[in-house]
Structure formats: structure tokens, C-alpha cells
Amino acid sequence: MSGWNFRELASFIEYKAALQGVPVIYVDPKETSKTCPKCGNVSRYNRKKQGWFKCTKCGYQSDADRVGAINIAARALDALGA
């Protein structure tokens, strides 16, 4: 799998999701790990440490990957109109 390009991986995910009736939603990941999921503040200073997120505006803190995942999920829900 490590030799797959992103298009191949996306095609595989789309195929498997279709078999199970699961929708695949593409969202723009830009700035998702620098955006506070609580207040919406976007700043490169929210990520002073590689793996940790701390909002410079409201003080929210969490693992940086978790913050990115929360923001991606929120964008997907917005795309669905949920």
C-alpha cells in the first residue's frame, strides 16, 4: 500500500465505500490543523509545537492531529448540509 499514489488510494476507498453504501465526501484540508475548532481562529502560531495545538485566541488545547480531524469532519458535515 505504501507504493500507492493518492489517486489510487482514493479510487480504492471509493470502491469499497460504494460496496457498503457509504458516501465519500472530499473536503479541502487547507489550514485544518491551524484552525481552532472552538472559536475558528486560524493562525500558524496555534501550532508552536509539531504535535500540539493551542489556540492563541481562546486557549483551546488538544493534539494537533485530533484538531485537524475535527475540522475535516466539520467540513464534511457542512458539505452534507448537516
Image (tube, rainbow, N blue to C red):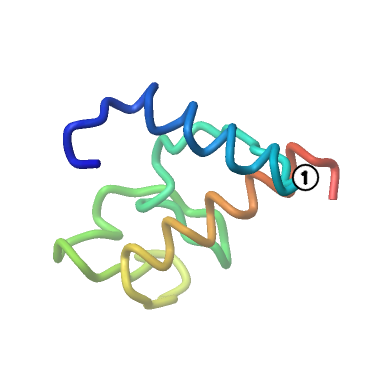
Q: Is residue 60 left or right of residue 74?
A: left
Q: Secondary structure at mark 1?
A: loop
Q: Residue furthest front?
A: 19
Crowding at mark 1 (Cα within 10 Å: few <14, some 14-19, many 20+): few
Residue at coordinates 44% horizontally, 52% vertically from top-left? 35
Residue at coordinates 57% horizontally, 62% vertically from top-left? 39
Q: In this rendering, is residue 70 above or below 7?
A: below
Q: Residue furthest top?
A: 7
Residue at coordinates 55% horizontally, 54% vertically from top-left? 40
Residue 24: x and y, percent? 65, 38
Q: Which residue is mark 1?
A: 21
Q: In this rendering, is residue 58 above or below 75?
A: below
Kind of residue at badge 1 = Gly
**Residue nearest the observer in this picture, 23 or 62:** 23
Based on the displayed image, in which of its 4 quarters is residue 63 positioned? Answer: bottom left
Q: Is residue 21 left or right of residue 14?
A: right
Q: Residue furthest right?
A: 81
Residue 61: x and y, percent? 38, 77
Q: In this rendering, is residue 68 above or below 14?
A: below
- Locate the N terminus and report the quarter of the image it occupies: top left
Residue 54: x and y, percent? 32, 71
Residue at coordinates 50% horizontally, 32% vertically from top-left? 28
**Residue nearest the observer in this picture, 1 or 34:** 1
Q: How many marks?
A: 1
Residue 12: x and y, percent? 47, 33
**Residue nearest the observer in this picture, 49 or 26:** 26
Q: In this rendering, is residue 65 above or below 13?
A: below
